[in-house]
Amino acid sequence: MKHITFNPYRTIGIKNTTYLKSDSMFKHIDQIKESDWVLFPEYWQVNSLVYGLNKKIFPSVNSYHLGHDKIEMTRALLSICPQNVPYTLILPNNESGFETALNEMPFPFIAKEVRNSMGKGVYLINDVSEFREYASISNVLYVQEQLPIDRDMRIVYVGDDVIAAYWRVGNGESHLNNVSQGGEIVLELIPREAIDLVKHVAQTLGINHAGFDVAMVGDQFYIFEFNILFGNVGFQKLDISVEDKIVEYMQKEDSKLNIDTMFVS
């Protein structure tokens, strides 16, 4: 197989892969056409690669389109597992939307920027003035109930299965458990129900590369969001190669395509 990658950091261990800078994409159209897979393009490249050049990309187009925006992601989750989504309001950023949020979401609650990750753009809102401050920097009001937790789970789905799962425990100084925000990785048993939930969501939505953030309250599981460009610190502790899992998946997909082609011919 011959591959093009636009993100060498995430494809270091994948053989026969040529790195191109994303901003030089249109200077290398012929080289891209000759490749078997295009790996980790930037979001703005996806439509040209998939619909214009008819290329196989990894992560999947579903992963990109749903993972790019928390609003689209949340609506997709609400369509298939509403009981596993924290109470969430998505409202226009005007006075009516502001008042609706205050009437329906008790303090404290969480407010998020719709295009951010690694715990960035996530705010704990304790009062009206803090909510006003958030509203001043956001185009849309995205607010979510604050769950009574001091930890959550990172469950990573690559290819067609969960490849890693671990707890992230907060440091007690923040409302966030993200490792990038000071959370600690704890390698303890992850409930099977949480893993099955992530499998169901990924397979239903066509997601093939994402880190899911899952909370547990009593015996109920909640998905906050998923990130298609997740951190790798947990994999270092677990001694897992994401690149190997990606290669296995691509080989499996190519085998399926070859079998389908044989039957058609």
Image (cartoon, rainbow, N blue to C red):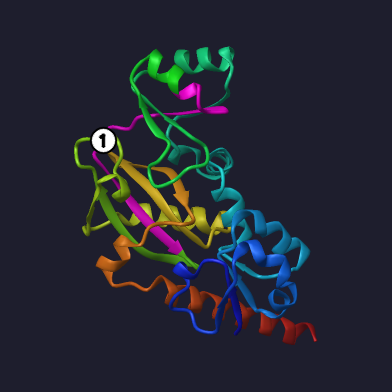
- Indicate the quadrant where residue 58 lies: bottom right
Q: Which residue is nearer to you in this view: 114 or 217?
A: 114
Front-most of 228 and 62? 228
**Residue 133 picture location, percent across and down:** 44, 20
For the point 62% across and 67% down, which residue is it? 57
Q: Amino acid at mark 1?
A: Ser
Q: Quadrant of the C terminus?
A: bottom right
Kindly give the residue lying farthest to the right in the view shown: 265
Give the answer, above or below, for where 89 lies relative to 70.
above
Residue 68: x and y in percent read 56, 48
Residue 87 counted in the magenta span = no
Disc 1 is placed on an element classified as: loop
Using a 10 Å C-alpha cutoff, classify the residue at mark 1 as few (fewer than 14 neighbours), some (14 to 19) or many (20 or more): few
**Does 111 sit above or below residue 219?**
above
Q: Is residue 203 left or right of residue 243?
A: right
Which residue is tagged 1? Answer: 174
Residue 135, percent from left and from top: 49, 22
Q: Position of residue 54 (x, y in %)?
A: 74, 68
Measuring 31% from the left and 39% from the top, which residue is drawn there?
176
| Quarter holding residue 156 | bottom left
Number of marks: 1
In which quadrant of the rendered image does the N terminus lie? Answer: bottom right
In the image, is 149 to the left or to the right of 114?
Answer: left
Instruction: Using the image as rendered, state which of residue 8 and residue 63 is in the foreground.
Output: 8
Near-viewer residue (57 or 44): 44
- The residue segment tinted magenta is 134-157
Placement of 262 over or under 111, stated as above or below: below
Rendered residue at 59%/78% (across/down): 3
The picture quadrant where one finds residue 171 is top left
Q: Residue at x 54, y 84 (%)?
A: 16
